[in-house]
Amino acid sequence: MFGLFLLFVLDQNKKVVSIFDPIPIPTLGNNVLKIVVDNLNLALEVANPAFKDDISKWECIVPVAPTNSHCALSGYLVFNYMHSLCDGKLYFPIPNDGFQLRKQFLVHLLKYEENEAQNNITYIERSIIDRIYRWTFIASKGGPSRHA
């Protein structure tokens, strides 16, 4: 919507839609659900033909999450929300600085275990990436552990 990325998290058991908005506009979160609810209902029917619930009747939550007013960074923030999210909570620190967001994204891509070009990265560069990975993705206490 508006060239920005948003993350919708649907909890079918609790009938709750959480909207993570990297560029929050006051009161937009609840209005966004009203705008996209028809498309969400259609998508869920295609994904699961047994789904007959109406999401417009679900509770809508817009959790407090790191934000940045620069529109071009919304995709990086949404990626970090997805990486950090577990049981509806953000467990890992998410920077709102553009350089740090891009660095985390790049490091994640380079460390991805199915990275086809991983063998083209020299040992020295991989060890540097490993160190950056350890410095960049530090789990907070009580959160789940993540491995590259």
Image (cartoon, rainbow, N blue to C red):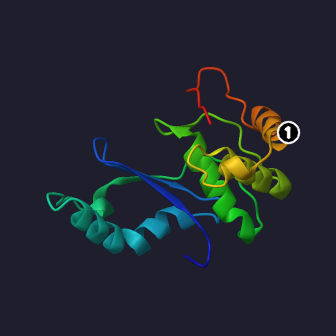
Task: Say if 37 sits above or below 66 in the image.
Answer: below
Give whichever of 62, 147 is nearer the camera: 147
* Residue furthest to the top: 142
Q: Is residue 66 visible?
A: no
Please give the name of the residue rendered at 61% of the width and 56% of the height, measured from the top-left corner.
78
Quadrant of the image containing the N terminus: bottom right
Residue 36 position, x and y percent, is: 41, 72
Mark 1: which amino acid? Ile
Tag 1 secondary structure: helix
Please give the name of the residue rendered at 58% of the width and 44% of the height, measured from the top-left corner.
83
Give whichever of 72, 113 is nearer the camera: 113
Is residue 126 toward the left or the right of residue 2 in the image?
A: right
Is residue 59 toward the left or the right of residue 52 in the image?
A: right
* Residue furthest to the bottom: 2
Mark 1 lies on residue: 124
10 Å neighbourhood of mark 1: few (<14), some, or many (≥20)?
few
Quadrant in the picture for residue 47: bottom left
Is residue 45 toward the left or the right of residue 61 in the image?
A: left
Give whichever of 53, 30 is nearer the camera: 53
Please give the name of the residue rendered at 31% of the width and 42% of the height, measured from the top-left corner.
14
Quadrant in the picture for residue 127: top right
Q: State how many labels appear.
A: 1
Q: Is residue 105 visible?
A: yes
Task: Say if 129 sits above or below 10 in the image.
Answer: above
Give whichever of 62, 22 is nearer the camera: 22
Quadrant of the image containing the C terminus: top right
Residue 140 position, x and y percent, is: 68, 26
Residue 41 position, x and y percent, is: 28, 67
